Each structure stands twice: as C-alpha cells, then as structure tokens.
Image (tube, grey):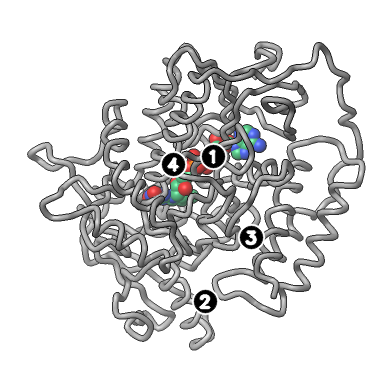
Amino acid sequence: MNLSELKRQYSVVIVGSGIAGLYAALNFPEDVDILMLSKKERHQSNSSLAQGGVACVLDLENDSYELHIEDTLIAGGRANDFDAVTQLVEEGPGDVLRTIDYGVEYDRDENGELVKTLEGGHCRRRILHHKDTSGKEMVDKLVLAVEKLPNVTIADETMVTSMSRIKNGFKMEIMSGSEFKTVYADFCLLASGGIGRVYKYTTNPSVATGDGIRLAYEMGASIKNLSYVQFHPTAFNGANREQFLISEAVRGEGAYLLNCNKERFMDRYDERLELAPRDVVSRSIIMESRRLGSNNFYLDIRYKGEEFIKNRFPGIYAGCLKQGVDISKDLIPVFPCQHYLMGGIEVDLNARTTLPRLYAAGECSCTGVHGRNRLASNSLLEALVFGRKAAEDITKCIRAGFFKASVPEDEKEPDRNGAPLPKGTRTEIRDILQRAYFVIPDEGAIHQGKKRIENILNRLKNGKFAVTADYCEALSLATVAYIILKEVDR
Ligand SMILES: Cc1cc2nc3c(=O)[nH]c(=O)nc-3n(C[C@H](O)[C@H](O)[C@H](O)COP(=O)(O)OP(=O)(O)OC[C@H]3O[C@@H](n4cnc5c(N)ncnc54)[C@H](O)[C@@H]3O)c2cc1C
C-alpha cells in the first residue's frame, strides 16, 4: 500500500480484515468513512483458516436457543457472561443468514436444505459449513462485499505500530514496508485477532501476535482473562511452528482418537469420549502421554471410506497428503497445540472497551461469551455478532452528534531509528510460554518465566530499537506473555 494515498483522518479505523473487521465494515452506513488495516494481504487471518464452520440455531423444531446456550455454558465451565451468551445465540442466526445474502455458500443437501454438522460439546447438529474450508469461503465472499463499499479503504500490508489517545479520538502510527504515516481516527475498532504466535506450536498464522491487545493495554484499556487460552487437541503433529488443524468435525463425523499403542483411550478420562470439549480432550491426551511415556497420538477416520473423506474433508485430505499422510489409508498423527484465546480486551455487549471510542471485536476481545473454554464454532459467530454491535454503536454515537478527533495542524515526525531487535528474542518468549503455560500449567516455571519476560519487556520498551514489524511484534508477544503469566502466577 502506498501510504501517501491515505487521508490523514477517518471517522473509523478498523484494525483487521478477518471476519470481525469485515462484517463490522458491512454494518456501517455508507456516509461513514472507514480505513481498514490489514497487516498482511487482506485474506490472511485466523478467519481464513477456519475449517469446521459457524454454529447457530436455525431449526427450532429439533434445536433451541436454550440448548445452544446450555452447551456454551457447559464448555465454558459456567464462567461465561450469561447476557453475552444469550445475545450471541439469539442474534447470531440473523447474522449468519445475512452472510448468505453476501454470497457465502454453506453446504446443502440434494433438496437444497442447509446441512448441519456436529462438533464436540454440541448436543445438536447446528454447525453450518462449507466443506472443511468454511472460513476461507466466508472471508472470500465478505472481502468481495466490502470491496464494493465506496466508503471503505482497505490498506493491505499495513500495520499499526503504536497508538495513543488524543482529544476525541486516536493517533495511530502505521507502517507499510519502510513507509510510515500518522493517521487520526474519531473511533477505532480493534479486530486484530489472536495471540497464537506467542506459543512455539499453534494453529494460528503469522499475523496472530496479539498486537491489538498490546495497543489497548498500552493505552490503559482493561484486559480480561488473558490466561484463558485454548489448546486444540488434534493439530497435525509435524515439525512446523504453524500446525495444520485436524478439525473437530473429523471427530464429529466419527474419527477415533488412539494412543501410541493404537488403542482408543478416551473412556479412561471422560464418558463423552472423542466428543468431549476441547480442554478435556487436550488434557486427556497429555495425561495419557505421561501414563505411557509417548507423545504419539493418532486420529483414525479410515473406516469412513475414501469417497466420503475426500468429499467431506477435501482441505484436510489435501493438507495431510502434502505431509505424506493419506487419511483414507493412514492414521493421522496428532498432538495438542495453542489454538484460540477466550480472554482479551474487555468489552460490553456493544463491543465497547473500557476506553471511550475504542471498540474491540472477534478474537482480540473478551466478551465473556466463551467463559473458560470456547465451544467449537462459536467464535466466527461471536466475530459476526460483536462486529455488527460495534458498528451499530459507533453509528449511533455519530448520529447523535459528536466531536471529531482534534488533529494537530502539522507534527514533527517521530524518530524511528535504532538498533535491530536482538536475535532470538521472539524464540525465547515462545519457549518460556510453551514450557510454563501449556495444557497442564507448570507451576514452577510460571514464576521464573514471568520474571524473565518482565525483563525482556522492559528492555524492549526502554531500549532504543528501530521501529520494524519484527520489533513491534516482539513487543506484542512480550506484553501478552507477561499479562498471561502475571494472571496465573500465584
Ligand atoms: C486453523 C483454525 C481453525 C478454526 N476453525 C474455526 C471454526 O471452524 N469455527 C469457528 O467458529 N472458529 C474457528 N477458528 C477460530 C476463528 O477462526 C477465529 O477466532 C476468528 O476467525 C477470529 O476472527 P477475527 O476477525 O477476530 O481475527 P482474524 O481473522 O485473525 O483477523 C485478524 C486481522 O487483524 C490484522 N492485524 C493484526 N494485527 C494488526 C496490526 N498491528 N495492524 C494491522 N492489522 C493487524 C490481521 O492482519 C488480520 O487481518 C479457527 C481458527 C484457526 C486458526
């Protein structure tokens, strides 16, 4: 993006082009001018990788809002915010149906009826999906819809490096390649996604470094439950940092989970077997690995047959084949890894943070919807519902008459030069968190880890480093790791 093409001031800046940011943009009236920032290319996000689908109650004869609410509360250990869950479940179906109006195609049967699948923790089939590439389908279609909006400018490869509050708005430093610019926003919606890259192994792509959480924290917004991290039980057990996800839906369709002796073992830990919620399955795998002294676990879906597998899970089939595993003939090696963040920037039912004019939606926010553990396929739904809520609330403020951000006439460029980020900084942060705070936390490593991360964070903040993506992301990772470990250090 050539930053000189951007204006100096926008009514709304949306940080992020995942489902939360895209759907929010679609919910503003066309007289509100919006800048949408995307750290990489606009399709690159956690949203694009979603496989399973989006949960919502559409069939009120065989399902009910009460049942979806109850499933969400059970998965969340009843630490959820009940009003937020109710809003999610009751308003979500309307938003999902609107995505169909924007062109999103969910799988249908031969009569044209929407096909709903089952995932762990759901007592009814209520997940709409597009084969096993649901997120890509949603992002592709919503991006096309947003691109048609005359009031939205999307800036790809453009990262917010820092942000501060000014009278009636925000001052934001943005960077694209080696170019910098200061933009001003009357309102800001942080839709910057997750924190996966603070772990050694995660299903999240490289953009997931918790930047939005760091920016909100630095400005003094309340951050809540950052230690509520979800570990997915069945990521492909390969050598890469970004682990390929073997969706819950594979177990939903009947795959067995096997230990190193190729035996099913979930009955030792939970009567819901393979369909127990994610945290339970992840913990069971770790306990079983300690019992048997082996990290080798497998999913077995072979008995479903090649035709079913290729048609229902084409993305997973192709992804595993790339790693040399034909899932219609071979066992799939799996192990837990970081997947999702339930906590984040604290928001209310309208996606308002604790700071005026600052909103947050999607994975970077903490709406209270998920409690301690997210129910599968509730997060795309949350991104839709709370993305819309943010847009509606900001629009209401704009319509009620408001003061625009006070922008200075001209400003001195900040000095962005300095030393490069010391090699190994990000690796060290990741190693500490992976060791101290994985599926079963290591109490001994938490305290030491927190002290070390605090040192790294102070060095990054107080040293004179060049403003680069590497440096800003390291700052975000250290901030996120520090808040997590501080929360759990007793
Ligand atoms: C492999 C995988 C499978 C999943 N499957 C499902 C599923 O089946 N169902 C479900 O409900 N959920 C699923 N999830 C979770 C779900 O995809 C995410 O929680 C959700 O999509 C998050 O959307 P978001 O809009 O909040 O963030 P994201 O989609 O992650 O988007 C974040 C955006 O913020 C931008 N950004 C970040 N920092 C900056 C910065 N400093 N400056 C500018 N831009 C920035 C990024 O570039 C990106 O555009 C899955 C997640 C993964 C990783």
Determine if residue 384 is in view: yes
Foreground pick, 205 / 366? 366
Up/down of 468 relative to 312, above or below: above
Label 3 or label 1, whichever lies nearer to me, is 1
Give the Cα distance between marks 3 and 1.
32 Å
Q: Residue furthest front?
A: 400
User: Is 214 placed left or right of 146 in the picture?
Assistant: right
Q: Earlier in the sequence, mark 3 or mark 1?
A: 3
Q: Quadrant of the C terminus?
A: bottom right
Give the Cα distance between marks 1 and 2.
43 Å
Give the Cα distance between marks 4 and 1.
14 Å
Q: What element carries label 3?
A: loop
- Residue bearing the label numbered 3: 200
Q: How crowded is mark 2: few (under 14 residues within 10 Å), some or many (20 or more)?
A: some
Foreground pick, 99 / 331? 99
Give residue 352's mark: 1
- Residue bearing the label numbered 4: 383
Name which quarter of the figure residue 172 lies in. top right
Which amino acid type corresponds to the residue marked 1 in the rendered image? Arg
Mark 4 close to ligand 1, CB under 8 Å: yes
Label 2 or label 4, whichever lies nearer to me, is 4
Which amino acid type corresponds to the residue marked 4 in the rendered image? Ala
Q: Earlier in the sequence, mark 2 or mark 4?
A: 2
Q: What element carries label 4?
A: helix
Give residue 295's mark: 2
The residue lying at 37 percent from left, 44 percent from top is 381
